[in-house]
Amino acid sequence: MTKYEIGRQIGNRKVITTSGEPVGQLYDLEMETNGKLNSLVILPDVNTKATFPKDDKGRFVIPYSMVNAIGQYIVIKA
């Protein structure tokens, strides 16, 4: 059951850029079959100026390689 531990620890966190701009809120994690974290699915903030690739439901899909830090907020490189 360790597989889902990351999701429990960072679920519903706010996502911001390295410059402090709000991006949105973590919605889901996309993982590869081997358990490697592939990307974050983010519900965009209404006032965000960020432009990232979106899925068919309008949510940002951000590669895990863009994550700079995970703490009180998830900080991504922009």
Image: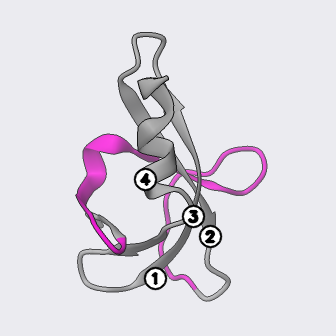
Asked whether, in this view, residue 52 is left or right of residue 73, the answer is right
> Quick one: SS at disc 1?
strand
Circle 2 packing at 10 Å, graded few (<14), some (14-19), many (20+), is many
Q: Which residue is located at x 66 percent, y 56 percent?
A: 59
Q: CA distance from mark 3 to mark 4?
A: 9 Å
Q: Is residue 57 magenta?
A: yes
1 or 3: tag closer to the N-terminus: 3
Q: Which residue is located at x 62 percent, y 70 percent?
A: 44
2 or 3: tag closer to the N-terminus: 3
2 or 1: tag closer to the N-terminus: 1
Tell me the magenta residue range. Answer: 48-73
Q: Which residue is mark 1?
A: 22
> Quick one: SS at disc 2?
strand
Residue 74 locus on image (x, y percent): 36, 65
Looking at the image, do the residues carrying marks 2 and 3 touch, with CB atoms under 8 Å apart?
no
Q: Which residue is mark 2?
A: 44
The residue under label 3 is which amino acid type?
Answer: Asn
Q: Residue furthest front?
A: 1
Circle 1 packing at 10 Å, graded few (<14), some (14-19), many (20+), is many
Looking at the image, do the residues carrying marks 3 and 4 touch, with CB atoms under 8 Å apart?
no
The residue under label 2 is which amino acid type?
Answer: Pro
Between tags 2 and 4, which lies in front? 4
> Quick one: SS at disc 3?
loop
Q: CA distance from mark 1 to mark 3?
A: 14 Å
Q: Which residue is mark 4?
A: 9
Q: Which residue is mark 3?
A: 12
